[in-house]
């Protein structure tokens, strides 16, 4: 296939055969570079094996992408790159073109269609010797496999066979190369994923490369659900950065959708689909250098950076983005955090894409795609061959984010809202400034993220303090009473403990008090009917209050908010809204299970089933005592229910097991509609406490029946708002002490 004067290529058949042995293969093809390049040769149907690498290992280490369309994206990226390479080598009139063909075929009688194959054709540089060599090259570094060459591995992870046919021009001769990419067993046995099918000289024709994906290995319905419009949406979302920055040099992009080999529909991606630059801002960023002591300082030298801002519909741009640009391409490998606006924030239905370019960025581009050699503060000045002066990545980030706030005042307002949210969280949970000042908050931080960061810093401080306390306690054992410095050392250790322990206790108490503050605020919202659920009906209010103070059906008082009524109540055993017949005390049934005929008559008289009644809350502080709490809805006149607690006390006094003998009762009737004169008129024994805004009835008799001795009951009638007032007063005293 080599014709004409070959002297400048210095080709010797014997040498090439020794380099590429052809055991039992009939045809050997030689490909030629320019005189200063080597000559590559591949046999027809030759498996391209990797040297010093195991493809089984590579495939194991390079995991299958979670993005089902990743092979398509990889191929599309390669097509764009191939077109760019050709653009640089040929006249400016050259116009790139990419055609994507999606084909489905019917498999059943119900008009459902399954993915058959997808092809991407471009008129880029083609797979000449140089590009084919690059395709088959994997690089290794001391940290494992670099991402170079990993894109094609997604081909084999998703498809059983990928066929690539490429027509290219090498020197003045046209060639057609075809090869297959797969991880079938026959490939891996030869430590290969590429099979070179043929390379032959052809008549002059259009330069093009066609990649065809076949034999889908696994399907999560993504490919079956694809059509031309859906694929266009996916490409716009994926490549919006590239499209925006390369709008004027965008190749023709066509997407064709076939059903049963018949063209069903088609669409294209054109300049009209790509937004224009909304605003442009130029900024100067200072270089930095290191002092002899290793400190970083900014110097007067600067570089100019350009920020291009795009406003893009949220339907296309899923997140706000900030990217660096080098040589006209968006750099994905070097990230800048956008701290002026959160990822998902929108303005008028739009999101923002900010692209930052500079001669400096281009000068820091590396041979590895997507990686820039821009130092960070943590590593600056510590390398043997570092520049004496350079621009730091953090300074670029800060400068760009500051400029963005100036470009869009609306963005600055969003940032201020985020800062206000942090301030409110600190206030809500009583977080001190010393803790928050050590933390870098991002606009993308959710409330849970903010609190997590705050608590992690606090936990770290407490751990250090606890370790010091433990160290001080342990050091007491090392003291020698006979030592001349014994008294001084002892005092020093004790003083440190006296100082440290209260600080730790204060931290723990702060969170406890902060939680109580939130409970009080929620209680107030319920009373003022400010919850959405309260708009449905008034009769829901009582249930909300009940569950806030002590969850219905619960027996865990420690997890309750009964401290709103009395601080001691959270330490007592108790039950919330349980039938009298099912109540237990210390694991035993509280009420008798067998009653006399007369007892049965009374318990079920007048149509009432008294043992089925459910007191709101029963607490047992100790043997022989019981606390009864009843809730009334805020709109209910409490004076109509003054005897309810007395009836519960009577049932407990007379019908419980003999061994319990509960004789002393404390009743709390809680509501909001309380008219003192109505209470006094209904039960004259009540008295009004003017100092603490509640009514109380001194102890009266609880009559014992059938030989049981009498008991006694003390009762209070209290407004919910009074409980809130008392709780706020107690809690504010704690807060003032803790924050002082």
Image: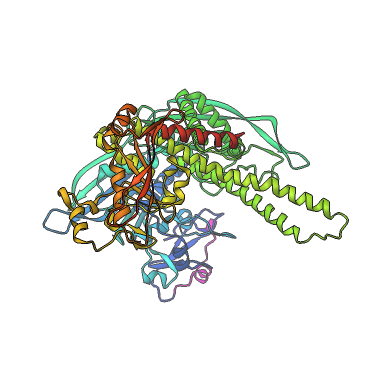
The image quadrant where one finds the N terminus is bottom left
Instruction: Residue at the far right: name it.
Output: 484
Residue at image position (49%, 66%) is 50
Q: How is the image coloured?
A: rainbow
The image quadrant where one finds the C terminus is top right
Say if residue 331 shows up in the picture.
no
- Pick the front one: 675 or 725: 675
- How many marks do you count on the picture? 0
Instruction: Residue at the far bottom: name it.
Output: 24
Q: Is residue 15 magenta?
A: yes
Vertical order, 319 against 662 (above or below): above
Say if residue 580 shows up in the picture.
yes
Magenta portion: prevailing SS class? helix
Q: Which residues are magenta?
A: 8-22
Residue at image position (65%, 48%) is 501
- Res. 659 image quadrant: bottom left
Q: Is residue 669 magenta?
A: no
- Whether residue 227 sits left or right of residue 360 in the image: it is left
- Whether residue 295 sits left or right of residue 168 in the image: it is right
Vertical order, 178 against 461 (above or below): below
Q: Position of residue 178 (x, y in %)?
A: 36, 59
Q: Position of residue 248 (x, y in %)?
A: 40, 32
- Res. 440 image quadrant: top right
- Pick the front one: 730 or 738: 730
- Pick the front one: 337 or 34: 337
Residue at image position (54%, 27%) is 403
Vertical order, 656 against 233 (above or below): below
Vertical order, 125 against 116 (above or below): above
Instruction: Residue at the far left: name it.
Output: 109
Q: Position of residue 461 (x, y in %)?
A: 62, 47
């Amino acid at each position: 296939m080599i014709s004409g004067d070959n002297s400048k290529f210095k080709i010797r058949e014997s040498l090439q055969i020794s380099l590429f042995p052809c055991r039992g293969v009939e045809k050997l093809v030689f490909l030629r570079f320019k005189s200063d390049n080597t000559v590559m040769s591949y046999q027809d149907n030759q498996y391209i094996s990797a040297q010093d690498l195991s493809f089984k290992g590579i495939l194991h280490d390079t995991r299958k992408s979670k993005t089902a369309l990743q092979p398509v994206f990889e191929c599309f990226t390669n097509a764009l790159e191939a077109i760019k390479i050709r653009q640089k080598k040929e006249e400016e009139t050259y116009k790139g073109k990419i055609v994507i063909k999606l084909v489905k075929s019917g498999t059943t009688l119900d008009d459902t269609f399954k993915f058959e194959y997808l092809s991407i054709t471009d008129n880029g540089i083609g797979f000449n010797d140089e590009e084919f060599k690059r395709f088959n090259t994997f690089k290794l570094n001391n940290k494992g496999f670099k991402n170079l060459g990993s894109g094609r591995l997604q081909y084999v992870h998703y498809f059983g066979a990928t066929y690539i046919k490429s027509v290219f021009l090498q020197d003045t001769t046209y060639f057609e190369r075809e090869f297959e990419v797969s991880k079938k067993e026959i490939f891996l046995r030869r430590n290969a994923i590429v099979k070179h099918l043929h390379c032959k000289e052809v008549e002059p024709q259009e330069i093009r490369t066609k990649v065809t994906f076949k034999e889908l290995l696994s399907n999560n319905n993504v490919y079956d659900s694809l059509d031309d419009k859906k694929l266009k949406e996916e490409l716009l979302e994926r490549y919006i950065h590239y499209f925006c920055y390369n709008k004027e040099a965008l190749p023709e992009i066509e997407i064709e959708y076939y059903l049963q080999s018949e063209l069903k529909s088609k669409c294209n991606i054109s300049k009209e689909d790509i937004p224009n630059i909304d605003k442009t801002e130029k900024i100067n960023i200072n270089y930095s250098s290191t002092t002899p002591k290793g400190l970083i300082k900014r110097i007067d030298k600067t570089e100019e950076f350009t920020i291009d801002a795009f406003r893009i519909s949220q339907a296309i741009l899923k997140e706000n983005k900030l990217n660096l640009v080098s040589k006209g391409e968006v750099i994905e490998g070097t990230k800048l955090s956008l701290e002026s606006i959160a990822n998902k924030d929108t303005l008028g239905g739009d999101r923002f894409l900010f692209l930052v370019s500079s001669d400096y960025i281009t000068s820091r581009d590396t041979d590895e795609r997507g990686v820039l050699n821009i130092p960070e503060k943590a590593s600056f000045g510590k390398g043997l061959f570092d520049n004496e002066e350079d621009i730091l990545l953090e300074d670029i980030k800060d400068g760009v984010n500051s400029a963005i706030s100036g470009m869009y005042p609306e963005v600055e307002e969003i940032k201020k809202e985020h800062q206000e949210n942090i301030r409110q969280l600190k206030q809500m949970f009583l977080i001190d400034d010393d803790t928050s000042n050590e933390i870098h908050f991002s606009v993308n931080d959710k409330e849970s993220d903010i609190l997590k960061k705050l608590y992690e810093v606090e936990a770290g401080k407490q751990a250090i303090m606890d370790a010091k306390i433990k160290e001080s306690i342990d050091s007491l054992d090392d003291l020698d009473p006979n030592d001349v410095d014994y008294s001084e050392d002892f005092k020093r250790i004790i003083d440190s403990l006296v100082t440290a322990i209260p600080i730790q206790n204060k931290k723990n108490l702060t969170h406890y008090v902060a939680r109580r503050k939130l409970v009080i605020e929620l209680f107030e919202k319920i009373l003022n009917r400010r919850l959405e659920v309260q708009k449905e009906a008034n009769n829901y209010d009582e249930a909300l209050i009940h569950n806030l103070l002590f969850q219905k059906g619960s027996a865990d008082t420690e997890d309750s908010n009964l401290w709103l009524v009395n601080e001691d109540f959270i330490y007592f055993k108790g039950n919330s809204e349980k039938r009298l017949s099912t109540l237990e005390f210390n694991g035993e049934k509280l009420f008798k299970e067998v009653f006399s005929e007369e007892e049965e008559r009374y318990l079920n008289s007048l149509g009432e089933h008294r043992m089925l009644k459910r007191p709101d809350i029963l607490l047992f502080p100790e043997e022989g005592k019981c606390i009864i709490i009843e809730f009334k809805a805020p709109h209910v006149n409490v004076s109509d229910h003054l005897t309810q607690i007395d009836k519960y006390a009577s049932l407990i006094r007379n019908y419980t097991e003999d061994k319990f003998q509960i004789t002393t009762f404390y009743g709390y009737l809680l509501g909001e509609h309380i008219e003192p004169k109505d209470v006094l008129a209904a039960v004259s024994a009540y008295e009004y406490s003017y100092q603490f805004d509640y009514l109380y009835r001194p102890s009266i008799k609880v009559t014992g029946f059938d030989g049981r001795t009498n008991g006694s009951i003390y009762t209070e009638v209290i407004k919910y708002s009074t409980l809130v007032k008392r709780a706020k007063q107690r809690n504010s005293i704690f807060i003032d002490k803790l924050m002082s």
